[in-house]
Image: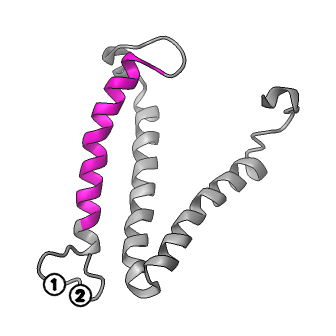
Amino acid sequence: MDLENFEAPAAGKMTPYTAFVVFATGIFASNLLFNAILMRRPLEGAPISFSTYFRGTPKVHLIGVLGGCIWGLGNLFNLIASGKAGPAISYGLGQGATLVAALWGVLVWKEFKGATLASAG
């Protein structure tokens, strides 16, 4: 990926914007495949059909799309930032999102409120 010149990248290199489009296209295509597999052979619960999936409310589907858009925007910004901060720093900051999400769940949403050690395993 050419992080120096977004307007005219070096031959054989993509800009962060092109990399984002290619990556998002791959995620969309693989999502169709993995959804189909996991609907037929779920990790837990009974298998469901495609008609059950499409009976979900528009609100629920839009929440999923919004989550993907937020993730995609964060990924795009991470790719762009690697040109200024360097790939190692940008990667580290991007991985910090997992910590922020975990802290948000524990501290804001109280996901483990009322949990006991016996329920852990």
Report the front residue among 70 and 121.
121
Up-down relation of residue 30 to residue 41 (above or below): below
> Where residue 69 sits in the image (x, y, percent)?
39, 53
The kind of residue tagged 2 is: Asn
Evaluate if marks 2 and 1 touch, with contact meaning CB atoms under 8 Å apart: yes
Name the image quarter holding residue 35. Answer: top left
Viewer-nearest of discs 2 and 1: 1
Q: Main secondary structure of the magenta part?
A: helix
Q: Please give left or right for residue 57 compared with residue 54 in the image.
A: right
> Where residue 32 sits in the image (x, y, percent)?
28, 34
Does residue 28 belong to the magenta stretch? yes
- Which residue corresponds to mark 2? 5
Question: Disc 2 versus disc 1: distance between alpha carbons?
Answer: 8 Å
The residue at the point 60 percent across, 57 percent down is: 98
Does residue 87 belong to the magenta stretch? no
Colour convention: one colour
Please identify the residue farthest to the top as the structure is shown.
46
Up-down relation of residue 46 to residue 115 (above or below): above
The residue at the point 68 percent across, 52 percent down is: 102
Q: Residues within 10 Å of mark 2 (few under 14, many from 20)?
A: few
Report the front residue among 29 and 43.
43
> Where residue 111 sits in the image (x, y, percent)?
75, 40
Q: Residues within 10 Å of mark 1 (few under 14, many from 20)?
A: some
Report the front residue among 121 and 104.
121
The residue at the point 41 percent across, 71 percent down is: 77
Query: Could you tell me which quadrant the C terminus lies in?
Result: top right
**Residues shaded magenta:** 19-42
Please identify the residue farthest to the left as the structure is shown.
11
Up-down relation of residue 17 to residue 83 (above or below): above
- Which residue corresponds to mark 1? 10
Secondary-structure class at tag 2 = loop
Query: Could you tell me which quadrant the N terminus lies in?
Result: bottom left
